Amino acid sequence: MKKMLALLLCLLLLTALAACSDSESASSETTEASSANETPAPSEVTEPSSEETHDHEHVNYKGLEDATYTLEEVTLAEGRAPDFTVDQNDTTIYIYNNVTLDTLTFTQVQYTFLDTGNRISCTYTADSGLDEILESYKAVMTDLYGTPSEGNGNAPTFTWRDGHTANFIMLTQLNDTTVQLAFYLNEGAQ
């Protein structure tokens, strides 16, 4: 009788284990199916690889995409050494006269290396025709980077921000004779 009771208990235990195993398997399948339909948590989202392509341009100036570029890379981008330099507030500004960027022409381009990021100021100076220059610069930047946000100060100001980086571009008419297109490139922006 004791042997029969022990055997019955063993069968009952095996049946219970088998039932638990089937329940875990069904539960696992349900969890896998529901997690396949869920949006991954932010920590699970993979960042795009550097080889992925986007349907837009990242803010850059002649291929300089973040503030880690060097003066040698500036010289390569411009195809020549700076025309002259100016020291201002413990910062050296590297200046090029008569520069083109694709279809845009600038009277002067100034490179400033800063602790918070680098600034490339592209200006066009003339006694007249600045409205047309401002509109042509705006059209080219809009084709590249989309619709700008507009400032509502004394002079029209247009800003293009890169959604993937902290880089941005500002276009404004500084005064009666100068239009400025400034690129602000930050470290680690790629």
Image (tube, rainbow, N blue to C red):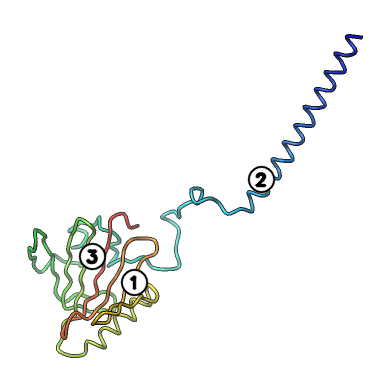
Q: Nearer the viewer, residue 163 or 141?
A: 163
Q: Nearer the viewer, mark 1 or mark 3?
A: 1
Where is residue 141, by image quadrant? Answer: bottom left
Circles 2 and 1: CB atoms closer than 8 Å = no
Give the residue type that dot 3 points to.
Ala
- Give the structural element (helix, strand or loop) at label 3: helix
Tag of residue 32: 2
Give the residue type that dot 2 points to.
Glu
**Residue 149 location (% of width, % of height):** 35, 75
Q: Quadrant of the N terminus?
A: top right
C-alpha gap between disc 2 and disc 1: 43 Å
In the rendered view, would you say 92 is above or below 14? below
Badge 2: how crowded within 10 Å, few (<14), some, or many (20+)?
few
**Residue 74 location (% of width, % of height):** 20, 62
Tell me the residue that label 1 is attached to: 160
- Give the structural element (helix, strand or loop) at label 2: helix
Tell me the residue that label 3 is attached to: 77
C-alpha gap between disc 3 and disc 2: 52 Å
Residue at (90%, 13%) from the top-left corner? 4
- Marked residue nearer the N-terminal end (3 or 2): 2
- Give the structural element (helix, strand or loop) at label 1: strand
- Marked residue nearer the N-terminal end (2 or 1): 2
Badge 1: how crowded within 10 Å, few (<14), some, or many (20+)?
many
Q: Quadrant of the C terminus?
A: bottom left
Q: Specify whether 86 is left or right of 19.
A: left
In the rendered view, would you say 140 is above or below 186? below
